[in-house]
Amino acid sequence: EIQMLTATLLLYSAWKAETTFGLAIQNGELINSYGSSIGTRHFYKLYNNLWDLYSTSGKIKNGLGRRTHISRTFPQNSMIFYCSDFIDNSGELVDIVHLWRNTRRYDFIPVVIQDEFEFTFPLITTGSFVSLENPETGGQDEVWMSEKDSVEIQNINENRYKRLCDSFNKNNTFFTHLHDANLSHIKKSFLHFFDQRKRRGSG
């Protein structure tokens, strides 16, 4: 939900700014590109693709878009909002160095989408079953968790998130972190991000 709202807000903002904009979904080194253009028709085309991909009521479609490499998808110096949890299927951080290599020709803006179960974890004071769902696969499971277990997971998640932040800071890369599906909060986060970036002289 956070990713859907974020992508829609960014597309809408680019449309209202009357600038060229596009949408792409990454899959490894390759991405499915939905094209770059301008105007109302293009906005609704991309929005409908988003709806088909992420909406629970929209029809899920595979193979949409044109498969290409990320370095050939957008013109050089394009502003790219890269929306991701930056966590692979094993629960580890993705290869940030590899990502830098593929995006150095762009104005690259990482948008970290992690909710409270990913960048931290709630403390469970009494042992209980916790219902967990994989948002990408829809798989669900109930896991028995004690207070000790929750503290251990909390430490793992917070250390992983700290490593992610450190990797961005080492590369002098400004990023924003979105952790709930509230449109007002997402908007404020982007306004704050660009205000901070402007103050630090990065345009």
Image (cartoon, rainbow, N blue to C red):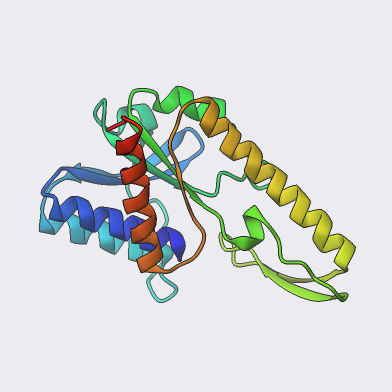
Would residue 127 be found to the left or right of residue 67 on screen? right
Tell me: residue 43, above or below residue 66: below
Question: At 86% across and 67% down in the image, what residue appears?
Answer: 147
In depth, the one of 168 and 53 nearer the eye is 168
Q: Quadrant of residue 61?
A: bottom left
Looking at the image, residue 39 lies above or below residue 88: below
Q: Quadrant of residue 31?
A: top left
- Residue 23 image point, x, y percent: 30, 47
| Image quarter hosting the N terminus | bottom left
Front-lying residue, 198 or 87: 198
Q: Residue furthest front?
A: 199
> Which residue occupies 27% across, 63% down?
48
Where does residue 116 sit, x and y in percent of width and height?
62, 62
Residue 56: horizontal and vertical position, in percent? 45, 73
Whether residue 16 sits left or right of residue 108 in the image: it is left
Look at the image and tell me in which quarter the C terminus lies: top left
Is residue 71 positioned above or below 139 on the image? above
Residue 109 seen: yes
Marker count (numbered): 0
Q: Is residue 179 left or right of residue 197?
A: right
Whether residue 61 can be seen here: no
Image coords of residue 177 (percent x, y): 49, 51
Location of residue 163 with respect to 171 vertically, above or below: below
159 sits to left or right of 26: right
Q: Nearer the viewer, residue 182 or 75?
A: 182
